[in-house]
């Protein structure tokens, strides 16, 4: 079942056939393949390369193949070389010799190029939708849980922030990711159909017709590039890798926060699993899997970058490898975004534990220094003074705000009663530009 038997005198070896076939991977492109073929037929009719009745037969035949695949009556499997052979041969089986006219003025090289662009464009749109869903979940959780918590640098308690501001950082990351994916969609929005194998065709075709029918912004400018460009997949997979990196950082925080050591959140049972031996365990598997699957997406990007490196123009069979990698990456990123969104929606914020962590961490030490600066001390001197104060607090096992004003004044004579208000954790969040931390900004 080949599209190219003519110049061969010998059958393809069975093992070569198995090695060469892409059907088990590209079977999911049946919809795009048929959509591309229908646009191609409509163009051929308009350009008088097919008659109206030939066009109708081909289009009805292609639609019947599509609806039988969708209903399950026709399984996309068998000894076909790829999805393109599968569709064309099944079409010819149904409508007879007219089916053999489908491939007029076309090559599998521009055919696979159009199929993949349509598929990638559509899937990238889905990624944008699930990114938006996650941004919404983060904004909602932030708005409903804008509670005070410790912020960290070096994973050491640093200064007070709110849970809302912390989640808001991820809103910014995923909003940039959304722009990156949208930008990649804009760049790929060109129609390669009509490039032929590599050098166009002697038939008088009109690439603008298929461009309009398939909803692309314009036809590609160069035939050679049109059949061999896979940059758009790399660009999308780079954006997916950055999304996964962001998801992995968030996952790591969810895992830490749900540990007994932090106890800042509790993950919903629906997204956790238990241990077969330790009855008390509730493991954050959803977050761990997202963190783990990040490697898979990076791997896909590197795999395709490496495949394409050094390929001469134009099409080479190496390029068939693009599909498995892109499908793997896009499926993974969509699944992970969906799961993360649900984990955020359902997680429980343990406000009291966050507050207790603030109390134990000298999270107002910077503000004591700021207080001294407001009284005329130079910041570097203030920093030194508060350092000494912290040693004292550690010895006494006391928080700064629990010392008496007399104790505090031993470290600087400019400390008076008004310090308590200045270094109160809630008050800190309304002073100066820290007001931003109190607000929920994410409106994306
Ligand atoms: N299965 C092939 C691919 O994915 C389709 C294109 C085949 N073209 C060719 N000249 N053999 O790249």
Image: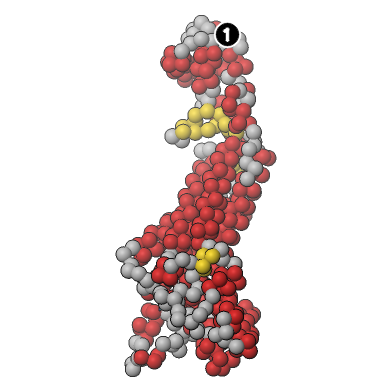
Seen in the picture, residue 153 relative to 341 is either above or below; the reply is above
Q: In this rendering, would 21 be left or right of 279? A: left
Question: Residue at horizontal 61%, vertical 56%?
Answer: 129
Instruction: Give coordinates of residue 350: x percent, y percent.
Output: 62, 38
Tell me, yes or no, if residue 61 can be seen here.
no
Q: Nearer the viewer, residue 253 or 39?
A: 39
Q: Vertically, is 326 above or below 409?
A: below
Could you say which is closer to the camera, residue 267 or residue 180?
180
- List the residue tagged with mark 1: 416
Q: Position of residue 185 (x, y in %)?
A: 53, 59
Horizontal arrangement in the rendering, residue 66 relative to residue 384 (left or right): right
Q: Residues within 10 Å of mark 1 (few under 14, many from 20)?
A: few
At x 51%, y 67%, the residue is 219
* Depth check, front residue: 109 or 400: 109
Task: Report helix, strand or loop for mark 1.
Answer: loop
In the image, farthest residue toward the top? 413
- Could you say which is closer to the camera, residue 290 or residue 218? 218
């Amino acid at each position: 079942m080949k599209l190219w038997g003519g110049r061969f005198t010998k059958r393809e070896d069975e093992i070569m056939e198995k090695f060469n076939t892409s059907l088990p991977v590209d079977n999911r492109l049946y919809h795009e393949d048929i959509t591309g073929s229908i646009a191609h037929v409509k163009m051929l009719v308009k350009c008088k390369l097919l008659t109206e009745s030939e066009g109708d037969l081909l289009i009805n035949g292609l639609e019947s193949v599509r609806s039988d695949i969708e209903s399950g009556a026709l399984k996309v499997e068998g000894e076909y070389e790829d999805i393109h052979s599968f569709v064309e041969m099944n079409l010819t089986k149904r409508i007879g010799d007219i089916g053999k006219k489908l491939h007029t003025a076309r090559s599998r090289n521009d055919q696979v190029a159009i199929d993949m662009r349509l598929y990638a464009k559509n899937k990238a749109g889905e990624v944008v939708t699930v990114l938006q869903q996650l941004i919404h979940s983060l904004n909602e959780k932030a708005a409903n849980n804008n509670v005070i918590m410790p912020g960290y640098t070096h994973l050491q308690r640093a200064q007070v922030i709110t849970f809302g501001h912390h989640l808001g950082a991820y809103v910014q990351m995923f909003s940039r990711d959304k722009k990156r994916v949208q930008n990649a969609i804009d760049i790929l929005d060109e129609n390669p159909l009509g490039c032929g194998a590599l050098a166009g065709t002697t038939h008088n075709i009109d690439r603008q017709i298929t461009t309009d029918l398939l909803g692309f912004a314009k036809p590609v400018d160069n035939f050679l590039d049109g059949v061999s460009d896979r940059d758009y997949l790399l660009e999308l997979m780079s954006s997916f890798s950055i999304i996964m990196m962001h998801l992995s950082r968030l996952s790591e925080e969810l895992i830490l926060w749900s540990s007994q050591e932090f106890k800042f959140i509790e993950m919903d049972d629906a997204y956790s699993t238990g241990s077969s031996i330790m009855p008390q365990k509730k493991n954050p598997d959803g977050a761990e899997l997202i963190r783990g699957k990040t490697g898979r997406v990076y791997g896909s990007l590197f795999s395709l970058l490496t495949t394409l490196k050094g390929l001469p123009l134009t099409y080479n069979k190496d390029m068939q490898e693009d599909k498995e990698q892109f499908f793997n990456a896009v499926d993974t990123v969509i699944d992970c975004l969906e799961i993360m969104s649900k984990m955020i929606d359902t997680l429980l914020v343990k406000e009291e534990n966050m507050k207790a962590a603030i109390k134990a961490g000298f999270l107002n030490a910077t503000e004591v220094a700021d207080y001294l600066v407001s009284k005329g001390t130079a910041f570097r001197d203030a920093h030194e003074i508060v350092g000494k104060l912290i040693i004292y607090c550690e010895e006494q096992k006391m928080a700064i705000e629990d010392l008496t004003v007399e104790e505090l004044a031993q470290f600087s004579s400019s400390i008076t009663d008004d310090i308590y208000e200045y270094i109160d954790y809630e008050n800190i969040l309304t002073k100066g530009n820290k007001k931003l931390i109190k607000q929920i900004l994410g409106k994306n």
